[in-house]
Amino acid sequence: MTGYPTRIDFAAAAEIIREVAGNRMLKAERVPITRASGRVLAEDITSSIALPSFDNSRMDGFAFAHASLSAEGATALRLVGEQFAGRLQAWQVGPGECVRITTGAPLPGGTDTVAIKEDCVEQDGFVRIPAGLSRGADVRRAGEDVPAGVRVLGEGSLLTPARVSLAAALGVASLAVAQRPTVAVFTTGDELVEPGLPLAPGQIYNSNRELLMGLLRAEGLEPTAWPTLPDDPDRMTTVLTDAAAAFDVVITCGGVSAGEKDHLPGLLAAHGRIHFWKVRMKPGMPVLFAEMDRALFLCLPGNPVSVLATFLTLGRDVLDGLQRRREPRSQCKAVLGAPWRKTHERREFLRGWLESAADGRLQVMPNAADASHQLRAAADSNALIVLPEGAREFNAGDVVDVIAC
């Protein structure tokens, strides 16, 4: 017995990650609203004011009392002043009168309707208002967007630019957000050489570091890339122990399978705690999830496509759990643009190209290069096609889940 789950279902692995990361949620911090986009909200936001906070004009035009209009046709109203956005004039508009008004300006007293400027004719101090306007036309009522005293943003939601804008419209100057996790990135292997240096026979360039750093930066994080670790267990233990004491998350690539140079499983079993090792998924089966000291460890296989698939499907769960994110990641459904034969039992994340078909439906075309070392296929793809457990034939036109990437 290993003492930890191995070769588990993908759903079980995801659930373990969510539970473990959720139990290690990072503390909240308060940031100015100018720095809040992309963060995870750590408090509910309740509207302290209504939006709009006053009745105002939806268009440039003329404001008046609807009761002043004639039932027989167009009505000429006397123009008595102007009301611009920014300050409410202290006057009362009487029957048979109107005022010029601009978009967003508060409705003056005595008015309840706006006629659009382009539909009116102004002449000799009067404005001819067209017939057929309904009461309240082109008026934004106070509170029609957001009433005062209601929850508008929930704890655990991602602060998109639109959500930050909503908070700003309510007068919120700062927000409590989850701290961003600190992340250390390690690539392992004696065969790795940095781009730009000459290759000796048997060596390859280190592509996984840039892949992971880019994926993490796309999450709004500032990861730290460490030098490549050699296939030396003592050196690995020293460096990873240091990282485990300093970072919230440690992500490694390579050294996690069952070969003679795959030292990470033994290292983490001896110095930390493994939560699972090996998941019934393709690509990425040898993925390992563990903890040591203050850090959660996500140890990914060395093949670059496995790195991409395991990070997008499991690595994001680690980051979301630590940051208290409660909203699920967006996932869509699309029709397969070509048939695909799945010959194994594992859940598969197949590379593909997602686009809108001629009939308006989303269509995803699988990439025939499906081996985990074929990075070109990942570069030529913009989505992962989720094929559920079980061997089966998929036909063109079948509906599948898709993860954009």
Image: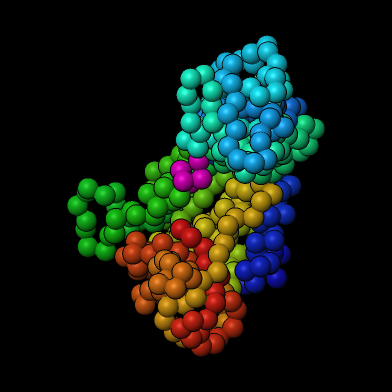
* 152 vs 218, nearest the viewer: 152
Displayed quadrant of residue 169: top right
In this view, the residue farthest toward the left is: 198
Picture coordinates of residue 13, whole percent (x, y): 65, 64
Q: Position of residue 54 (x, y in %)?
A: 70, 26
Q: Position of residue 126 (x, y in %)?
A: 54, 23
Indicate left or right for 70 with 247 as reference: right
- Dominant SS type (magenta): helix
**Is any part of residue 178 visible from this angle?**
no
Q: Is residue 159 above or below residue 366?
A: above
State whether residue 168 is above or below residue 17.
above
Check the picture and name the quadrant holding the N terminus.
bottom right
Residue in view at x 59 percent, y 83 percent: 390
* Residue closest to the far right: 149
Task: Depth check: give the residue in front, 175 or 17.
Answer: 175
Q: Position of residue 6 (x, y in %)?
A: 64, 69
Q: Residue at x 38, y 64 (%)?
A: 381
Q: Is residue 219 magenta?
A: yes
Picture quadrant of residue 178: top right
**108 or 205, which is in the foreground?**
108
Q: Hey, which residue is sitting farthest front in the picture? A: 72
From what the image shows, is residue 118 above or below residue 349?
Answer: above
Query: Is 243 one of the magenta-colored residues?
Result: no
Q: Residue at x 22, y 48 (%)?
A: 196
Q: Which residues lie in the magenta part?
A: 216-220
Viewer can see residue 23: yes
Q: Is residue 209 left or right of residue 34?
A: left
Q: Residue at x 21, y 58 (%)?
A: 200
